[in-house]
Amino acid sequence: MSVQEQPVIKCDSVYKIFGENADKMLKLAGGNVDAQEFQNAGCVVGVNNASFEVHKGEMLVVMGLSGSGKSTLLRCISRLTDATAGNIYIDGEDVTKMNDKELIELRRNKMGMVFQSFALLPHKTVLENIAFPLQVKGNTLKDSMNRAMDMVELVGLTGRENYFPRELSGGQQQRVGIARSLAVEPDIWFLDEPFSALDPLIRKEMQDEFLRLQAVLNKTILFVTHDFDEAIRLADRVAIMKDGIIEQIDTPANIVLNPATDYVRKFTEEVPREKVLKIISVMDPVDGGIELSDFKVSQDAIIETVAERVLSEEKAVAVVDADDKVVGLLHRAKVIHVLFGENASLESKS
Amino acid sequence: MNYLNYFTDRPKLIQFGIVLIVFFLLMSMTGEYHDLMVQRDFFVKAVERGNIQDSVGFFESIRMIFSWQLPPQLVRLPEISFWNPSVGTSFLNWLIAVFVATGLVFNNYTKTTDKNDWFVHNWGQIFTKGFIGILAGTILAPTLYNWFFGEITTSTFWDVPGYVHQYGQYLMFDFWIVDHWNPRARRYDEWGVVRVVTRTLADSLQFIITLIREILMGGFRTIVTLADTFSSQTGWDWMGENKGQWYASIPALPWTVLTAGAFILGYKLEGLKLAALASLGCLYLLAFGQWEPAMETLSFILVAAPISGIAGVIWGVLAFKSKAVEKAITPILNVAQTLPHFSYLVPVIVFFGLGDHAGAIATIIFATPPMVRLTLLGLKKVPPEVVEAGMMSGCKNYQLLFKVLIPTARYDILIGVNQVIMQCLAMAVIASLIGAKGLGFNLLLALNQLRIGQALELGICIVVIAVVLDKLSLAWANKQKDYFADLSFVERNKTGLLFVAIFFVACLLAWAGTTLVGGTVFNFIDQMINGMRSGLAGVFDITLYPIKEGASNYLWSVPHNMGITTEPFWQGGVDWMVVNWATDIKVFNNWLLIEVLMPMKGAFLAMPVIATFVLFMGIAYIIGGVRSSLIIGGFLLFMALTEWWERALISMYMTTFAVIVSVIMGTIVGAIAVQNKRATKVILLICDTFQVLPSFIYLIPVIMLFGINDTAVLIAVMVYAVIPPTRYTIEGLRSVPESLLDAGHMSGATKLQRMIQIEFPLAFPHIMLGVNQCVAFALFMVVIGAFIGTDDLGQLILGALSDKKGIGTGLMLGFCIAFIGLAVDNLIQVWSKKRKAELGLA
């Protein structure tokens, strides 16, 4: 992705502070917000100076424990709540300055959102729920039903379109939620802990389904979760939040290999690296003097998938990119080091 | 030392002890006034005769207190003078008012940070604080001034009812006079604009009621009204000319249509069981010959319930949208629900006149508050994510309201509709006091003639209608929407089509029946019924209505005199009880009156006003802190300032006695019943029936058995007031978490230990809510007990009802009753909330 391109979502020093004197306190603090100090004054800091950009087709996963402000951040961007200070740009337009009419237009055409508790309308069928955003937009009944039918197919609920939400399982309900959020063909897709309310097995299945959808649709995504594994698994980039502050924002591999703070490190310690890291993040640069084995691995492969083969090779293995060009090499000692070694030695490397 | 610790660990207990000690000290200080106080009105009369002063000076007061004697103004508040704003308001007073109001508003303004949006969020403040300002500037300030500097006062608190009356008259007759077209006399009259509005409203309401009534039972008044408007003649002239034409009257709906309709509706909403219940209900009304009054009552409900429902939803939505509205209407709802029905009958009569419409208006006022509350509750319960989903779908405000919020809150709103219907039926009898026709009116007539059997039958008819409508509306609330879009038109509308078919068949049958009247079939049925009636008359020795031979068309309707009646049976039963139990009852009655009730009444009356304040405000402080204490104090002060303090004490005594006995009985019955599933079911069914049964019915048997005295009233009150404690005890005990009971089992607790140590402590907050309801029910019945003859506030309200100038008196008395209820409600709610929070049940 090119950096010159205008970011789809851009947050510029966004603050969200709950409480009566929020404005006053923020002005006094002059951009230097201390959560404890605010709490003593009866304010709760939701989001504390968040600045980042999300580019077209990118998936940013915001990860944090409950109360870290991740959902609040999402709601500020979709303007379900108003940010206390800062600017939020969507396609270059400042959302915080929009009036109700512009906001409704924006939501009707550019945004879709999936909720943790599914938030389906209990009095409408699957089809009607999915068609709801189209209906409020004023589309004809036939148009919206046809479109909704396509969506039903997309999320694999064909045959259940006339069921009511109460007749569906959690996973199926969330499929409806996903279909509804996609019905208006939004550019930006917000997902607020979409899989948190599901059982672990269903969650895994839905994550796969989600990746499949994203491969087809290629939306710009802001995904909120409290599950670190999920974040690492899905994200292009991960933002880790604590007490309203974004502690680190980076690619999953960099976060695992180089946690910026102790807080982030706590999460990464438990992560099985071979399941997270791709070859590209651990390979050594090409060195002509080293003899290579016949075996080649793709730079995008997850270590786990090739570990057994690489470990059985005595010589270093060539790493190739999509065009089969050798871009690096990997010796089994390195793999063993990554899997069982200390962090410190890795950091200097990458 | 241990004892000391016990008490210092429980500061509330010490506070309570102090309050009690002060209370009893004050009680013992009545001295020479004691004998005057224990008899109602003796104190007041002594003041009137000049035997005692109603207040003494400061030094005299101090002297009296030191000689262990309360000064008279602490025993009963004297008639306190205050400055009357309607006599004349000086510029200074208005200045004070504006000053206070601006000060309050400005204070609020400086506190908020969001100055730009201040007005948007706080516009309600201008009214509330403005009201305080006006109160302070035009009433409080001059009054205080007069008290301190002894200027000539112009009015006393006791005159307030009179002023309310005058103000009402002024509004109706002198305020903003306009010309008003009088269609009957064909000329313009000079009417006050308020009167024009209220009468127009009344006439439109009356027209709708009449229209629905005539669709149900036939008639020609609607046609007359229409002719009045659309033809060149007056309605009655037109009717004279067109009499006998097919279009000159609306034919009655045959009973078969309604019964079949009820069946189909019940079947569609729930199933065969409900269908059977609904149609059997209709048949019951028919069999007992109460079809026509039942239709009158129904027509009245069909108008009042939808209006209440819609008004309730509108106010509920407004309150949901704006915190200011919610804050403003909450106290109004509280008062509207606790005000005795009688006291707002009076203003309704003054503003709207007598008749069905007046009854409907009183009913609407009474039935709307629960709808508002439930709508608000339902909307608040809509999960925030669903609202957010609606917003993210790009809903505009109205789309969010109608497509997301209201459908999602559907269940609670429909429960509100159910409540509205029940309230309407509860008002059926009371509304008939101001002219609503129907079962309630007939019931009142039967009561006046002391015909218990007839009254009971009518009462059960009301219960039948109530049960059927209750179950139907509950079924509606519980019904989930089904998916129909893929069915054909006929399949989708089969119930509707079936009803249309039945409608035509039934009408055809009814028409055919008319041509058969006098024919052998109906004659035969007439004869049979008459024979049965004569047989019954022989057994029970009663007189019968004469019947017209061969005049009935049973396919159309069953006339009143052809219905069966169980009246002789009930009459006989009551007679038997009176004959056989009279002596025992008399002994019990005397004992209760002389040993319990009279002393208790005396004790209540012997409370000096200051002692009452100390007791109630003290308890309120212990339970809810300063705020609660001040609220209770305010309620008490209002009562004490009126001339009816002694009456209020009597109301309190009756309520207290009834509540204590009812709570004890209800808790015991509930606790026993809950041990067995079937017993629980039976008890709950009895509770339901007793609650729906028009409360007037309880009056007759108690009069017959106990005579006209406090016992009779209190027994009637207790029968009614025992319902909530029973119900809440059952609910409370059932809601104790299963896991805790299991824990009890595994700790090896016996049944009794479980009951005392686990179930009751946990259910206690809920049971207290039952006590709260019990107080409300008891107050309600104490007021109705005025029909038997009491000497409390209720009796005076009943008096105000027949008094032309009674509007002020009725309202003020109503407020007194409402404030007793609200005071108790406040205490118990605060306590229960705290306790539930402590137990983690909230």
Image (cartoon, coloured by chain):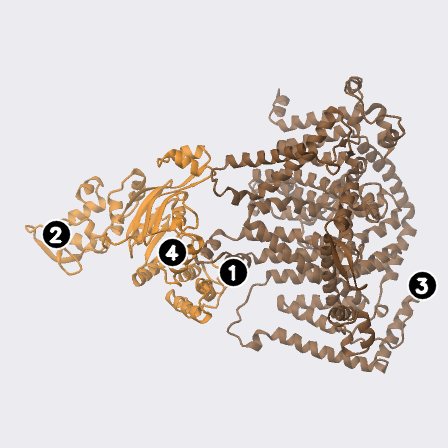
- Gap in angstroms between the C-alphas marked 3 and 4: 80 Å
The local secondary structure at tag 2 comes to loop
| Amino acid marked by disc 2 | Glu
Judge depth for marks 4 and 2 and give the one in front. 4
Few, some or many residues within 10 Å of mark 1 (<14, 14–19, 20+): some
User: In the rendered image, which residue does mark 1 sit on?
Assistant: B403
Disc 4 + disc 2, Cβ < 8 Å:
no
Mark 4 falls on what kind of element?
Answer: helix
With B484 as the anchor, is A295 left or right in this view? Answer: left
Which residue position holds label 3?
B541
Residue type pointed to by label 1: Lys
From this view, report whether residue B26 is shown above or below residue B312: above
Q: Which mark is residue A203?
A: 4
Location of residue B334 by image quarter? top right
3D distance between C-alphas at marks 2 and 3: 118 Å
Q: Chain of mark 4?
A: A
Give the Cα distance between marks 1 and 4: 31 Å
Helix, strand or loop at mark 3 = loop
Residue B761 visible to an observer of this rendering: no
Q: Is residue B653 above or below residue B186?
A: above
Q: CA distance from mark 4 to mark 2?
A: 39 Å
Question: In percent of the image, x 77 and y 78: which residue is there?
Answer: B246
Q: Position of residue A106 (x, y in %)?
A: 39, 57
The N terminus of chain A lies in quadrant: bottom left
x and y percentages locating residue B688 in the rendered image: 71, 54
Q: Nearer the viewer, residue A197 or B638?
A: B638
What kind of element bears circle 1? helix
